[in-house]
Amino acid sequence: MEYKKVELGTQKLKRLDWLKPAELKLYTLQFGSQSPTFDLWILHDETCAKDSELYGASKLRKLAYILPKLIQEGAQELLTVGSQGSHHVLSTCVAGQRLGLPVHVALTPQEHSSHSNKIYEQTCHLAHSVTHFKAQTSQKFAQELKQWQQQFTLKHSPLIPTGGSCLFGVFGMVEAVYELVECLFNSDQSNGHKTPIPSDLYMATASGSSLAGLLLGLSLAWPSTHQLPKVFGVRVSDQSLVNRKKVLRLFTEAKEFLSVNVLVPYFEILGDFIGPGYGLSTAEAQTAIKWAHNHDLKFDLSYTAKAFGALLSRERRLFLKTKHQKKPHIDSPQNQTQKVFLFWHSLDTRLAIQAPH
């Protein structure tokens, strides 16, 4: 098993050597026929895996830091929990197979789309055991989870929480921001063009750890000569799983572990784009999928389509509001036509996973 030492803050952390820098590509965006053209960066995190058998994008980034810690502590098998269409659970099963660690999963009910159903089928195929919870409330879920964990007392069987949302799950995104900054600010600009620097950054958030890692990475890596981008986390799961309090707690735990003294960058959690539930379609998501299709990209209904749909809908509304204001108010969006967007394509949409023989 190959590891890599990554220096973050004052710590040198061990991670699985499964990752490479993701591709960053520049696109253009308009919010109507009379709209100017905006620069849009897309960070294709689905390209961060070193080989095609690894799966998970931002989920894989989390596991690359979580799993070495658990293995060092003597893990003999892994437990994790998520919805029936959870990408985190599937990614954990794929990683466990690579490491020779059985993965036992507990799944909560979910109303399926065709995409989430494929994730669920792959999970059932790869998991060592699958238990279906019936809980409809957080209290009953906690009871079922406790009873389920008690079955695994004979071995060291650590539980990876929903979405990999824990301290070590934060650090993968911190490293990714360092890679982003390297690409934006330190790459060879041999063509003589000035690199557009993002002013607004959008990403999906389901459990909060990726968003916390993104914020910590920006506070550590972003050059002081440039203004930090505003960060918008588009909530795609229940508010109990991702909220401002949880993100701030994870941010604080991680910065204290790294022994760094930094402030939290500006961020908002947008909760108006989840629609009828996790993995289910919305009008904004369908608009995003159409845009992606026209640009040879793939979005999914659980994460990326809803997050990009939020970018399109919200920024179009702000642009039109600014355009029709004869006398801008103090709190109106500033420099709207000068915005540069960055969308974090945080989910691996591939389903070509090698199943065990």
Image: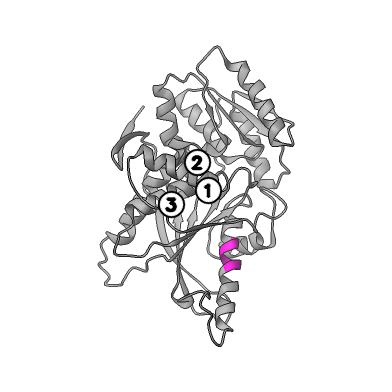
- Under circle 3, the secondary element is helix
Q: Hey, which quadrant is residue 186 in on the image?
A: bottom left
- Looking at the rendered image, the quarter that the C terminus falls into is top right
Q: Nearer the viewer, residue 326 or 351?
A: 326
The answer for how far apart the CA atoms under marks 1 and 3 are is 18 Å
Query: How far from the left and from the top, in percent, is residue 332?
Result: 53, 76
Q: Nearer the viewer, mark 2 or mark 3?
A: 3
- Under circle 2, the secondary element is helix
Assign the magenta stretch its main secondary structure. Answer: helix
Of the residues shown, which amino acid type is indicated by label 3? Leu
**Residue highlighted by disc 3:** 215
Where 192 falls versus 16 (above or below)?
below
| 26 relative position to 152: left or right | left
Mark closest to the chain's N terminus, 1 or 3: 3
**Residue highlighted by disc 2:** 59
Residue 312 is one of the magenta-drawn residues: yes
Query: How far from the left and from the top, in percent, is residue 340?
Result: 44, 69
- Range of magenta residues: 309-314
